Amino acid sequence: MHIAFAASECVPFSKTGGLADVVGALPGALAALGHQVSVFVPRYRQTKLLDAQKVVRSITIPFDDRYRFCSIVAAGNHSGVRFYFVEYPPFFDRDNLYGTSAGDYSDNAERFALFSRAVLEACKVIGVPQILHCHDWQSALIPVLLHTQYAEDPAFQELGSVFTIHNMGYQGVFPPDTLPLLTLPWDLFTMAKMEFFGQVNFLKGALVYSDFVTTVSRKYAQEIQTAEFGFGLEGVLHDRSATLAGILNGVDYKEWSPQTDKFIAANYSPSDLSGKAKCKQDLLNVFGMPGADVRTPVIGIVSRFASQKGFDLIAQIMDRLAREEMIMVVLGSGDKVYEEMFLRLSRQFPHKIALKVAYDNVVAHKIEAGSDMFLMPSRYEPCGLNQIYSLKYGTVPVVRATGGLDDTIEPWNRRTGKGTGFKFAEYTGEALLTTIKEALVAFQDQTSWQTLMRNGMMKDFSWNASAREYVKIYERVRQLKGAALATV
């Protein structure tokens, strides 16, 4: 089967979050199963290409004000996957992918509309796939276009579309005059299509028009059909429940394994945990705490600083948590309010919290390897990857039971010796504090703690199983598409 991906970011070429990890890893897993796979992403300023080759010199993209002309660059074959980049410097040659600290770029609707049309036009030149797998709102116009302006195009009559929601909190909502600006028909501006409280919602368009919708964990697929997690689109998703599935993200153990990790102070494994102590000392050094007692439990956080991540709960309990024997190391960047919150807490409790406001892949690896516990108190978490990385590193997750966190972490039972971490359900500071204290008590019994560590390290969340689940979805879409064509 020929499968093409369209997404706004992909490691190692561009990244702001977990979307890039998924788009960087899943195509390779599909290629390993014998499928032909290609990936389309924008060519940003941060995109480094060593073997770039222009394969489509000019694609005309219509806008209401004027035409724009972009091109397609290929950059070799990686793990059996062909990568293509939409090149249009006025839109993509910028310091950041989506915006600055002041907010999103004002022309994001135009930027990703151009990207979406360019993908479809490029497919007609390079080769039309059987499945076009789109990710998040930035590529959400592709299924909309396939069912509107490209509906009669003979090149796409057998093309099936799959759309994956990575986070319902980001929907691509724009003013109504965005439709004519992008030369899209006004009849899309209805409650049954793309209208959303008087605005145009790109994500809603994809939910309406895609042949199949997936999201990144089973629990999240259920949650987004409720008012609490649906962000206003729960009704649309409920109507699609027959063609909506949750498939847990996998992880790339070639990059995230303590046995081979090149960024950490010492490698270690379930059969030999001795290297983890060296990683812990190295982590304390990196965060400016070389004199700290290595027997003190270290709680790690690596995260984008955003309201969904539950950091308001930490602020509620930090004065009491600081009385416990523990050290918290925090790496992240994002919303200014949370950057300032952690800076304030690190100044208030300098021997308890150490902070680096940055995105730093090397330090992220050091936190996974050197921490004893990993904290993710998320308000909601579609899948989450860091808790899965943490399991492999023997760094015990402490998480809220939501989305993929609930799917991947099994509660520790000291009596039976089963389980992989600690979970709390109620979104309150009290519930978080109680659960952290439970983990700190469990840490004191190092014999059972090492059993807990090894339980997590033996778990396998590689992409192979998830890739097979996606193939089942693709095959189902092809069957649905074939049945629909047969009735025409």
Image (spheres, grey):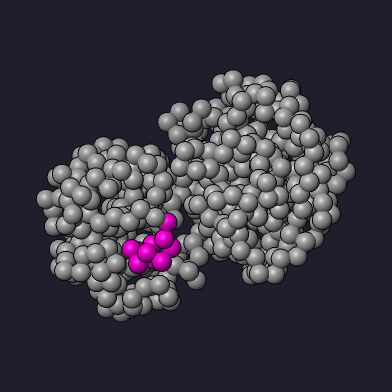
Where residue 442 sits in the image (x, y, percent)?
Answer: 18, 59
Please check the rendered image and state whether residue 363 is part of the magenta-colored stretch, yes or no. Answer: yes
| Residue 94 or residue 77, whichever sits in front | 94
Quadrant location of the N terminus in the rendered image:
bottom right
Q: Residue at x 69, y 61 (%)?
A: 83
Whether residue 26 appears in this view of the structure is no
Quadrant hosting residue 156: top right
Relative horizontal placement of residue 412, taking residue 407 as reference (left or right):
left
Where 423 sits versus 145, above or below?
Answer: below
Q: Residue at x 61, y 38 (%)?
A: 108
Relative horizontal placement of residue 349, taking residue 146 as reference (left or right):
left
Where 408 sits versus 463, above or below?
Answer: above
Q: Which residues are magenta?
A: 359-368
Whether residue 198 appears in this view of the structure is yes
Q: Residue at x 22, y 54 (%)?
A: 353
Quadrant hosting residue 289: bottom left
Where 470 sits versus 106, above or below?
Answer: below
| Residue 308 or residue 450, whichever sits in front | 308
